[in-house]
Image (tube, grey):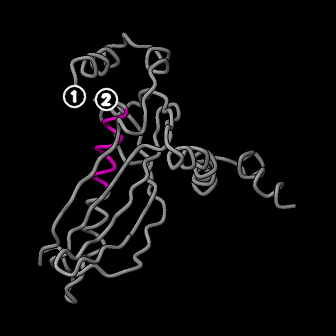
Amino acid sequence: MTISALFLCWASLAGQVNNNTMDNKLKSAANSLVVKSEILMPNDTNPFGNLMGGRLMYWMDIAAAISAQRHSNCLTVTASVDNISFNHPIETGSVITLTARVTRAFNTSMEVYIEVTAENIPSGTKFKSNSAFFTFVAVDQSGRPLPVPALVPETDFEKELFAGALRRRQLRLILAGRLQPHDANELKAIFDQKL
């Protein structure tokens, strides 16, 4: 953490930072980029010699948390995880690479996209194994939410993820019972376009 990031976290804990201080700071998705690789060892596998799902979710949560902390410059907690599907088994000895980045920041929460690839170096094969969206909330030492900087997407891929983030957020809120479907304007717009 930089000195300025430590100061902002300390100042927010001390009540010296208002929402506008953090809101005026813009960050790119590149600032939050995390690339983490692991070699799949026998203790990470199930009886079939394939990666255990729980181990992968653990690694994904860590990479996504680091990404959210880089963006917010504060501690973060996992608020939700979207669907994680296991499409391909990953064998012992494979190299797993997790790439995480913040896709959009809201008031105190951030959506983080994480993609997992598996690589068998001796055979030269590489494939996308999983991807998911995590939601994190920036918090102080007492667990109170803190405002986070806005995100400015730069690449086409980042712009695409940014554009869909509000719809994904509204869907999460509906499923959690915190938003009524008739209030989800971004989601309704999708269906209005189809008609």
The image's mark for residue 89 is none
Q: CA distance from mark 1 to mark 2?
A: 7 Å
Q: Quadrant of the N terminus?
A: top left
Q: Is residue 192 left or right of residue 138?
A: right
Residue 22 place in picture, x, y as percent: 44, 20
Give the residue at x 38% y 34%. Answer: 138
* Vertical comparison of 91 with 107: above or below: below
Give the residue at x 28% y 22%. Answer: 5
Count numbered badges in the picture: 2
Q: Label 1 crowding class (10 Å Cα cut-off): few <14, some 14-19, many 20+?
A: few
* Vertical comparison of 107 with 157: above or below: above
Residues under numbered marks 1 and 2 in contact, where contact means CB atoms less than 8 Å apart:
yes
Give the residue at x 25% y 72%. Answer: 119
Characterize the magenta stretch by its predominant secondary structure: helix
Residue 66: in magenta span: yes
Q: Quadrant of the C terminus?
A: bottom right
Q: Which residue in the structure is indicated by mark 2?
A: 73
Which of the two residues, 83 or 1, is positioned nearer the viewer here?
Answer: 1
Residue 69 place in picture, x, y as percent: 31, 37
* Vertical comparison of 23 with 120: above or below: above
Residue 104 place in picture, x, y as percent: 50, 40
Chain part drawn in magenta: 61-71
Q: Label 2 crowding class (10 Å Cα cut-off): few <14, some 14-19, many 20+?
A: many
The image's mark for residue 1 is 1
Q: Residue furthest top?
A: 16
| Callout 1 secondary element | loop
| Callout 2 secondary element | loop
**Amino acid residing under circle 1:** Met
Give the residue at x 71% y 52%. Answer: 187
* Vertical comparison of 39 with 154: above or below: below
